[in-house]
Amino acid sequence: MRLLADLVVKFRWMIIPFFILTSVFFASRIPKAEIESEMKSMLPSHLESRINTEMIDELFGGTEMLMVIIKTDDVLNPKTLERTKNMSRQLKRIKGVCNE
C-alpha cells in the first residue's frame, strides 16, 4: 500500500491530467446518452414473453398508466373526497380511460 502511495505522489503530474482528461471525455459523451425506460425493448424480439406482451398490447391498447396525486392536509376532509369523486367522474368520461 505504501508503494502505491509513493507512486501516486511521484507521478502526480501524470495522474492528475489523466483523470482530468478522462473526466472531460466522459462528460462530453453525456449529451449523446440515451435512457431506454421501456423494459420490453431490452428483451430479445424472439422471446416468447415479449411476443405475448406485444400481442396483449395490440389486443387491449397497451399498458400505459397515469397516476393522479392530490395534495391536501386532510385526506378524509369531505371537500377533498368530493373533489376526488368529481375528478374521477371527469376522467371516466375520457375515451380510453379505465378506472381500476
Image (spheres, rainbow, N blue to C red):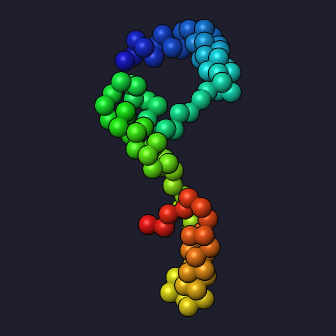
Residue 98: percent from left, percent from top: 50, 63
Where residue 91 sits, quadrant-wise, is bottom right
Q: How many marks?
A: 0
Examine the rendered structure and indicate whether residue 61 appears above or below residue 42. below
Q: Is residue 81 left or right of residue 25?
A: left
Name the residue located 40 percent from the left edge and 25 percent from the top edge: 45
Residue 34 drawn at (x, y percent): 59, 29
| Nearer to the camera, 29 or 66 | 66
Q: Is residue 11 above or below residue 99?
A: above
Q: Nearer the viewer, residue 81 or 93?
A: 93
Q: Name the residue at the left extreme.
A: 48
Q: Residue at x 44, y 46 (%)?
A: 59
Quadrant in which the C terminus appears: bottom left
Tell me if 40 is positioned left or right of 33 in this view: left
**One can see residue 16 in this view:** no
Residue 100 visible in rendering: yes
Residue closest to the eye, 36 or 58: 58
Direction bottom: furthest residue: 78
Point 40% across, 39% down: residue: 55
Q: Is residue 85 above or below residue 6?
A: below
Query: Could you say where residue 3 lies in the image, as x and y percent from the top left?
Result: 40, 12
Residue at image coords 46%, 31%:
41
Quadrant where the image shows the N terminus: top left
> Which of 8/79 is in front?
79
Q: Quadrant of residue 51?
A: top left
